């Protein structure tokens, strides 16, 4: 499962100008995975907050959440 995910990310980033090897875009791949982790964590915490009747403040601001949604 993860192997295919990394391959898909690599294929997209490899087409980017200035990337000639995997080492050129490892930073971007790491950043994408980190943002995905934060997005998933935020969704989980928001659901837990609703169930517990608490207000939840998103980890990623609404402006940037919209950008993440466009890329899905």
Image (cartoon, helix red, strand yellow):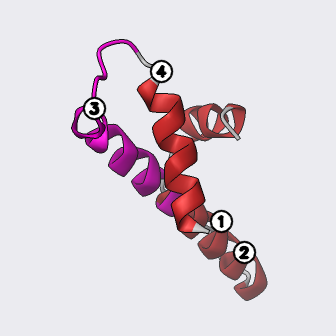
Where 20 falls versus 46 (above or below)? above
Name which quarter of the figure residue 58 lies in: bottom right
Gap in Å between the C-alphas at discs 3 and 2?
Answer: 40 Å
Residue at horizontal 38%, vertical 45%?
A: 29
Name which quarter of the figure residue 21 lies in: top left
Q: Earlier in the sequence, mark 4 or mark 3?
A: 4
Gap in Å between the C-alphas at discs 1 and 4?
Answer: 31 Å
In the image, 12 versus 31, the foreground residue is: 12
Query: Nearer the observer, disc 1 or disc 4?
Result: 4
| Residue 22 picture location, percent across and down | 30, 39
In the image, 58 versus 26, the foreground residue is: 26
The residue under label 2 is 47
Gap in Å between the C-alphas at discs 1 and 2?
Answer: 6 Å
| Residue that sits furthest to the left in the current view | 23
Where 5 falls versus 25 (above or below)? below
Residue at horizontal 48%, vertical 56%?
A: 59
Q: Which mark is residue 43?
A: 1
The residue under label 3 is 21
The residue under label 4 is 15
| Residue 34 picture location, percent across and down | 40, 56
| Residue 31 picture location, percent across and down | 36, 46
Disc 1 to disc 4: CB gap under 8 Å: no
Disc 1 to disc 2: CB gap under 8 Å: yes
Check disc 2 and report its element: helix, strand or loop: helix
Q: Earlier in the sequence, mark 2 or mark 4?
A: 4
**Is 43 part of what is drawn in magenta?**
no
Q: Does residue 26 appear left or right of residue 63 in this picture?
A: left
């Amino acid at each position: 499962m993860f192997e295919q995910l990394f391959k898909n990310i690599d294929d997209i980033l490899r087409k980017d100008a200035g990337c000639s090897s995997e080492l050129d875009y490892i930073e971007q791949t790491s950043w994408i995975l980190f943002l995905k982790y934060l997005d998933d964590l935020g969704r989980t915490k928001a659901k837990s907050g609703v169930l517990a009747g608490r207000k939840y403040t998103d980890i990623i601001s609404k402006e940037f959440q919209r950008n993440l949604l466009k890329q899905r």
